[in-house]
Amino acid sequence: MTAVTDTQDTWGHVPEAIDTSTTLRVLLQNPNGIRRSVTGKNFLFGLHLCREIGVGVISLVETNVNWHQTQHTCAMQRCLQKTFLPPNTKHP
């Protein structure tokens, strides 16, 4: 995967490094709709960047996704597990 500092497609500055054991970084993002699906490459890359900068809480507003449909919540859960759980971790 690409490092945050190597990314040309991001906007703004690179956030300061934090100690995630003592600091909770919260990301509030208005994507105005998650394009195509929550499993799309752009969305997964965004999750990767969140992990890399130490985001502990992700808040997405206006996703334009019907979260009452099981396929969307299951797809999101798989993406989050793939991104944030260590390799070889058994998923529930």
Image: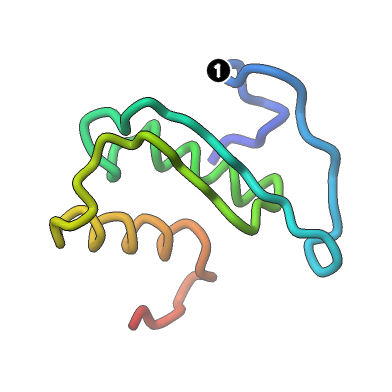
Task: Judge left or right: residue 88 versus residue 12.
Answer: left
Judging from the image, the colouring scheme is: rainbow
Quadrant of the snapshot with the C terminus: bottom left
Task: Identify residue for label 1.
Answer: 9
**Residue in the foreground of this view, choosing between 17 and 66:** 66
Is 48 on the left or on the right of 25, as rendered? left
* Front one among 15 and 3: 15
- Identify the amino acid type marked 1: Asp
Image-based side of 60 in relation to 71, left or right: right
Give neighbour class at mark 1: few <14, some 14-19, many 20+ (Cα, 10 Å): few
Query: Which quarter of the figure has residue 6?
Result: top right
State the image coordinates of residue 4 (x, y, percent, origin top left). 67, 33
Q: Position of residue 23 (x, y in %)?
A: 82, 60
Where residue 2 appears, as percent x and y from the top left, is: 58, 35
Residue name at image x 59 percent, y 45 percent: 50
Where residue 73 appears, as percent x and y from the top left, is 25, 59
